[in-house]
Amino acid sequence: MIILLSIIGILAIVVFAYTKQAKFGKAPEGQRLRTIQKSPNFKDGKFQNQHFTLELAEGFNFFDVTYEFLFKEKPRRYPTDSIPSMKTDLFNIPIEKNILVWFGHSSYFMQIDGKRMLIDPVFSGNASPIPNTNKAFKGTERYQVADIPPIDYLFITHDHYDHLDYETIIALKSKVKMVLCGLGVGAHLEYWGYEADKIIEKDWNEQINLEQGFTVYTAPARHFSGRGFDRNNTLWLSFLLQTPSKKIYIGGDSGYDTHFSEIGNKHNHIDLAILDNGQYDIKWKYIHNLPTEVLQATKDLKAQRLFPVHSSKFVMANHAWDEPLVKVTALNQSFQIPLVTPLIGEMVDLDDEKQVFKQWWIGIN
């Protein structure tokens, strides 16, 4: 018993020391924490979803889910083939062109009405704080920070490692004019050297008036946050980006809930909804959309097109790597929503609602 307790104690010390590395970020404190504590969405010491939300659905527990993820055989979670991709020169896209380029998972670049934007960039090749434990699929790492031009607005939807990547954020620092994020996330960014006057932190249901006709509306998502042992001390959110010519919904990570219809009723005629469709499971259905819910959420948002993301780069669930795209495409036969499904690196023309995309995942093992 003494030996066992000693081993447990040593492991606890090692884990605690490991989490003190810079990449784990910094908890909000001082005036930032006082602002958080005044939020109507912060209760009992944590941010709360609009409706009661379990991280694991009823009937499931952490130990069984962990055992299944680590030890049970699950066919085709990883592709054996390389994921097809292409390389677009982002520096030389004419500034008047309205485009989007996807980097896999939930990272993408947008250029709209003369402004360049980057959303949840992850270029380190790993979606975990532990090196080489959640490596990007072969073929998906076509872009690095050096391939990214100066960025007017960097959007961070929440502080999970597959959306807020320490190595990427550090490398981008000199290229970013302004960061938009949820309450508390700025603590990480300041800790990593971003200047406070370059960070805009907001609660849900706020309006950010930027320059030259650009307005951002923050909105709820149904998810959670945290980089270490502390959960929900920073806010997860979604964004409605309104430019002089476009309305784009940046969904981040979310389970299905009433916020989609509330956003749709408030903003009406959204040109493109970008929603997470991947790394889902019935076991955590409250914090990630299932494929049919992605399509229903698009209808709720009254969006003209759907770009399903959060797939094709990292493994965080038990489904086959291509299942999110296969399922959302099949289910869409009933919804008939125009789908945006580009290759990694392919240029999406945001002015062409009839642009056709290949089902590039077909035939890849």
Image (spheres, grey):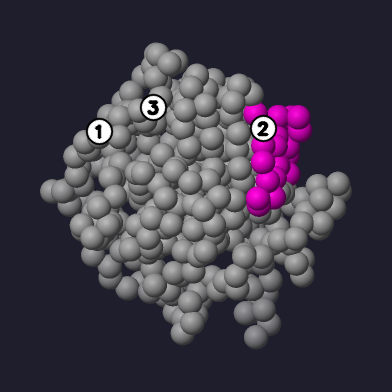
Could you tell me how far apart the alpha carbons at marks 1 and 2 are, in whole angstroms?
Answer: 31 Å
Which residue has dot 2 on it? 209
Mark nearest the camera among 2 and 3 is: 2
Q: Identify whether 15 is placed above or below 128.
A: below
Amino acid type shown at disc 3 = Ile
Task: List x then y, in percent, for residue 360.
Answer: 20, 42
Which residue has dot 3 on it? 99
Task: List x then y, in percent, for residue 28.
Answer: 77, 50
Circle on res. 355: 1
Q: Quadrant of the N terminus?
A: bottom right
- Report if residue 256 is visible in the image: yes
Residue at image x 50%, y 74%? 56
Check residue 292 for magenta coloring. Answer: no
- Report if residue 168 is visible in the image: no
Q: Residues within 10 Å of mark 1 (few under 14, many from 20)?
A: few
Horizontally, is 178 left or right of 345 in the view?
Answer: right
- Residue closest to the eye, 207 or 121: 207
Helix, strand or loop under label 2: strand
For the record, the magenta segment spans 186-210
Q: Identify whether 73 is placed above or below 323.
A: below
- Residue closest to the eye, 329 or 106: 329
Circle on res. 320: none
Helix, strand or loop under label 3: strand
- Residue closest to the eye, 321 or 335: 335
Q: Identify whether 358 is placed above or below 329.
A: above
Q: Identify whether 138 is placed above or below 277.
A: above
Amino acid type shown at disc 2 = Asn
